[in-house]
Image: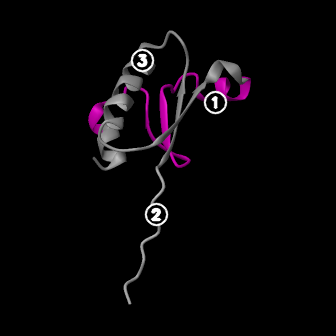
């Protein structure tokens, strides 16, 4: 009897950003490129909407998390995301 592989769900990606952040804009473009290669669910969070997040991440954004794990932050290169998404 063959073992059934459960349906793999798309990774949950959280992108911490804020308006006027050029590194964030660049990273968003990279995420869009990755989306052409693999599926994921994206939640984009502006850190200015939550003072706790702002204090935590203001010097670190952009931050990309996959399933609750930070995989890249700051000056993010395409290769950083490609490795994290295994593409």
Select label 3 or label 2 by which is in front: 2
Q: Foreground mark, 2 or 1?
A: 2
Residue neighbourhood size for the residue with mark 1, other residues' Cα within 10 Å, grouped as few (<14), some (14–19), many (≥20): few
| Residue identified by numbered label 1 | 56
Reply yes or no: does residue 76 show up in magenta.
yes
Q: Which residue is mark 3?
A: 25
Q: Quadrant of the N terminus?
A: bottom left
Magenta residue span: 51-79
Kindly report the distance in space between the C-alpha atoms of the residues bearing marks 2 and 1: 35 Å
Numbered circle sitting on residue 7: 2
Q: Residue at x 62, y 23 (%)?
A: 47
Pointer 3 with pointer 1, Cβ within 8 A: no
Q: CA distance from mark 3 to mark 2?
A: 32 Å
Determine crowd level at label 3: few under 14, some 14-19, many 20+ residues with C-alpha closer than 10 A: some
Q: Is residue 58 left or right of residue 38?
A: right
Which numbered disc, 3 or 2, marks the residue that appears first in the sequence?
2
Q: Position of residue 72 (x, y in %)?
A: 42, 37
């Amino acid at each position: 009897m063959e073992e059934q592989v459960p349906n793999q769900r798309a990774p949950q990606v959280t992108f911490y950003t804020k308006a006027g952040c050029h590194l964030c804009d660049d990273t968003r473009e990279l995420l869009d490129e990755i989306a052409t290669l693999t599926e994921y669910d994206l939640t984009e969070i502006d850190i200015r909407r939550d003072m706790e997040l702002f204090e935590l991440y203001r010097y670190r954004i952009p931050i990309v998390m996959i399933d609750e794990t930070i995989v890249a932050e700051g000056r993010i290169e395409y290769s950083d995301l490609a490795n994290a998404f295994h593409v």
